[in-house]
Amino acid sequence: MSVTTVTARAPWLARFRGSGWLLLLPALVALVVLFVVPLLSVVGDSFTEPEPGLGNYASLFTDGYTLRVLGRTLLVALVVAVVGVLLAYPYAYAMTLSGPAMRAVLVTVVLIPFWTSMLARNFAWMVLMQDGGVIQKFLGLFGLGDVTLLGTTLAVGISMTQVLLPFLVLPMYSAMEQIDGRLVAAGQSLGAPRTRAFRRVYLPLSTPGVVAGMSLVFVLALGFYVTPALLGSSRTAMIAQVINIRTRELLDFGGAGAMGMFLLVVTLVVLGLSRRLAGSSLSAAAAGTTPTRAGGSRGVVRPWLRVHTTVVAVILAVPTLVVIPMSFSSAQTFQFPPQGWSLRWYENLFTSPEWVAAILNTLQTGLYTAIFATILGTLAAFGLTRLNPRIRGAANGFLLSPMIVPHILVALVVFSAFLRLSLNGTLIGIILAHTALAIPFVVIAVTARLQGMDSALPHVAAVLGASPSSAFRRVTLPLVMPGILSGAVLAFVTSLDEVVIALFLQAPGAITLPVQMFNSVTVQIDPTISAASSLMVVLVSVPILFAQIRGSGRKRGKA
Amino acid sequence: MSSPISAAGGRVELTGLVKTYGSTPAVDHIDLDIQPGEFITLLGPSGSGKTTTLNMIVGFTEPTAGRVRLNDKDITRTPPHKRNFGMVFQNYALFPHLTVAQNVAFPLRERKVPAAETARLVGQALDLVDLTGMDHRRPHELSGGQQQRVALARAVVFSPSVLLLDEPLSALDRKLRQSLQREIKRLHDELGLTFVFVTHDQDEAMTLSDRIAIFNHGKIVAIGTPADLYHRPPTEFVARFLGESNVFHRPDQTLIVRPERLHVADSPESVPAGDVTEDATVTDVSFYGTYYRLELSYGDDSVGCAVLPVGAPAAVDPGAKVVAHWRPEDQVLVTN
């Protein structure tokens, strides 16, 4: 028994016990007010508007148009998840086989899409897939020149797969990292040929990562709005588009609410199932030996795997590689590769009143969101550690819940609530909604740091003469600071890149950069979006890089 | 304040100390009077209450009943940061975000010691543990043994009157453990502080301590000097826990014979007159360089052991039937 185990019953800390709830209170209140109450009222609407009953739900499954939309959405999400796994699994596997330098490159390539705003990536696909675009010309070489991609479900699927690919690679890679490479060799020594050893040993052990990644991507794909709205058409509508129209144009909160609830229920079921599935095989993987990088008998990167990995890397990087040259184009239309070069779109971006206003709005929204979410999330993370473990699980689950609710549903919920509070069309409304979305990221970052910290250290400080407040200031806070900083960065980036809610809450005075970009493609054709996309890459990647450099510096300072 | 690091050892008195969790007592009425400058070891199996007792001394755990006194002052309710104890932890517990010097300076800063004085004391403390010049290293750049030396320096730099050590050597490998044992002993001799040392390692306890308090089931079951407890164990538990023993159960008492007092003979004829005997079978013989160790099994299924000097006349092999014998004055009787 070390001091660590005594933590929970130290009397001089006991008086902080009750303060756990006090610290959690601000975040809990924020989530209840911004999230739970509006959600419940939308649920209420779905049963009462326009008339009481189950009519809205019945029409989900009886109305031919709605049924086709639901079916299409489920099918696209499933195909995206499956194709994504087929692309991502070998890539993640190759990551585990590579040497340190190559692995760094592969990891960076996976992170590039994260640094490239959602809208920018979709915009890049639009450019590539448009009539007369690069892809059509390429297909033309095979005599398929008149195939129209833009506006089809295929275009939506391709773009969504690319956008969601990192969510598949990362969990699979982290599951594979846990696998001792020598196990496959052990399987071979027990008489299984290499491929069978792989199938019977490696594949089952990596299943948790596959299940986790696949279900996450499936769920995210279900609620996707931006990609189908930009690359699809009304004939190929998915749930999110219909929710958008019913909410914002028809003000049919009942019908939209029923669709949103359908989305939420499917999401919860899929995530619940995946947790059970991954959980049971995860414990099997955990029973294995500790992973050893040194274990010499890791597989080799075979030629086919090299080719596959290169192709996936190109797919991951391509939108970013399109967006940046595009922004220097001199053409009035979206042309790739550009025929001539100019800075006119940058000039327009930084001089035209609406673009400048959008940039300032976005920065303002991001900063306030980061400040609010960091304060609430950090307090809550500290509060969580002071609760007893059983309640802690539930409180933690509640704090993280905004992460699993599809953004389109959040948008609908917030839109209907803010409409009543006349917060629609104000930046404050967007800031509040983004804060609710960003709290989980801060809670996760700070909690990870708190858990990684030796919980005995504040006690050690106490024996050495530090009062509780001094121990907090001199030991706990400096050790947790990297978590707080990276939480703040994540909150800022989340707000910066968020389109759907900002789109719902937009009004002439409250247009953020992503909304302006979205409108510049859908409402008018304004190539300034390519300059804006490049700006977004910078706005997103600089804080992340900053956090990573700070983080690695801190990590070196850690035992 | 320009005194060197050292202080008069404090006297720690525990009276009627109880700690219960729910209805189970972790510590059950402990009385212990720790003398100024003494090196006392709390020894016991895990879960015996020794760590809980230490945590009540330092103030991490509040006793259910009883008193803790330091130099006749009641500190039972004093928070840890006002008790002025030094403490060394099993996992070193250095602050990872601070350098070696900053770690050692930590308690001085809390006590508002002026900068120049702090620098002097930190240098002195690092000299004391042979880490001169390591000031600007980070904990993770040090070996386990070096980290524990830093922890020792940090625990004594502010001249506490009592140093508490919670299994400080158990995370280290055997070689390092021995060198740090010597280090700790030297520190005790040089500084004159009271040392309270918690361990489950009996060898460590025997080598270092002035007195050992043996814990079992939340109680102190024996207390005395290492030699006392080894040669005259008051109970079978103590005999078994501290060193090895041959234990013979007689109808109304138990006989204990230490291995080095037990001899083996080929036949009853070669047993010296007056010795107590017991038939035994040799089950294993191992060579330790300076001696042989014999595993013995007795008629009543109990097992024991004996040590034979290398070059002893009788060469024994596993399986041999022998007669174990010892002088009556070498046995210890304990009541059941």
Image (cartoon, grey):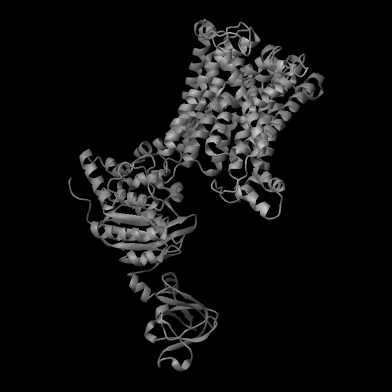
Q: Kindly identify the residue that appears in the image at 38 percent across and 38 percent down.
A: A472
Q: Image height check: is A301 above or below B161? A: above
At 66% from the left edge and 30% from the top edge, which residue is drawn?
A: A217
Above or below: residue A369 compared with residue A519: below
Q: Quadrant of residue A140?
A: top right
Count every numbered label the image shows and give the total: 0
Residue A148 lies, with reference to residue B35, above or below; the image says above
On the picture, is B183 further left or further right than B60?
left
Most foreground residue, B202 or A533: A533
Residue A175 coordinates in the image, percent (x, y): 61, 41
Q: Give the percent coordinates (x, y) of residue A160.
A: 67, 24
Picture quadrant where residue B110 is located: top left
| Towards the viewer: A300 or A95 | A300
Residue at far left of view: B2
Can see residue A375?
A: no
For this rendering, which residue is in front, A173 or A81? A173
In depth, the one of B124 and A10 nearer the eye is B124
Task: Identify the image quadrant of the N terminus of chain B.
Answer: top left
Name the residue at 33% across, 73% down.
Answer: B227
User: Residue B97 location, x and y as percent?
Assistant: 38, 39
Q: In this view of the protein, can residue B23 be seen by the observer?
A: yes
In the rendered image, residue A148, in percent from the top left (x then y), is placed at: 75, 15
